[in-house]
Image (spheres, grey):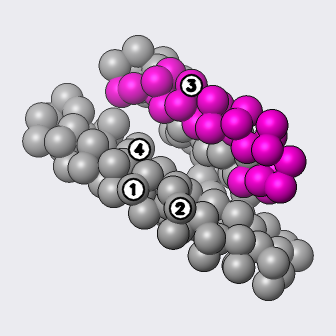
């Protein structure tokens, strides 16, 4: 029950909708450019994770190999570092207030996802 309440508050006050729309638009752009479809899948995964982060976690995907590692290096160079930095800055800013601490923690959870998304999957926590 608390996860549901935190997710709803995250959507309204924590920027979940804005993040999901941003990652969704990036996914659509990547899908239009056919070569970047794997990055579009990663951006779509990030959109869903940023929409509903409480009660979910990121785990390594079994079977992810060298290709996802090389694609992650390209992702980090092009987009991952500034996405991770923006989540880190937003997390610190939100943690400055007592009410914003859970939202700051949610932004900190999004840092590794934004920095190194390929070869990982979002799963529900028990």
Q: Which residue in the protein does label 2 denote?
A: 78
Residue at 70% across / 64% down in the picture?
118
Q: Which residue in the protein does label 3 denote?
A: 21
In the structure shown, which secondary structural element does the residue marked by tag 4 occupy?
Answer: helix
Name the side, left or right, on which 22 lies relative to 30: left
Tell me residue 83's x, y (percent). 43, 52
In the structure shown, which secondary structural element does the residue marked by tag 3 occupy?
Answer: helix
Between discs 4 and 1, the one toward the N terminus? 1
Q: Which residue in the protein does label 1 denote?
A: 82
**Label 1 packing within 10 angstroms: few (<14), some (14-19), many (20+):** some
Which circle marks residue 106 in the picture? 4
Residue 109 visible? The answer is no
Cα distance in 3D space between marks 4 and 2: 23 Å
**Label 3 packing within 10 angstroms: few (<14), some (14-19), many (20+):** some
Between discs 2 and 3, the one toward the N terminus? 3
Name the residue nearer the viewer: 26 or 90. 26
Between discs 3 and 4, the one toward the N terminus? 3
Tell me residue 110's x, y (percent). 47, 51
Name the side, left or right, on which 31 lies relative to 115: right
Query: Which residue range is magenta in the image?
Result: 14-39
In the structure shown, which secondary structural element does the residue marked by tag 2 occupy?
Answer: helix
């Amino acid at each position: 029950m608390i996860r549901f309440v935190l997710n709803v508050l995250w959507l309204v006050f924590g920027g979940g909708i804005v993040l999901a729309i941003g990652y969704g638009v990036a996914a659509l752009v990547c899908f239009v450019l056919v070569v970047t479809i794997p990055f579009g899948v990663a951006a779509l995964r990030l959109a869903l994770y940023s929409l509903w982060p409480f009660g979910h976690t990121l785990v390594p995907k079994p079977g992810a190999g060298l290709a996802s590692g090389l694609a992650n290096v390209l992702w980090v160079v092009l987009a991952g570092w500034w996405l991770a930095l923006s989540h880190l800055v937003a997390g610190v800013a939100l943690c400055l207030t007592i009410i914003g601490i859970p939202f700051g923690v949610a932004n900190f959870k999004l840092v590794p996802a934004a920095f190194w998304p390929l070869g990982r999957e979002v799963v529900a926590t028990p």
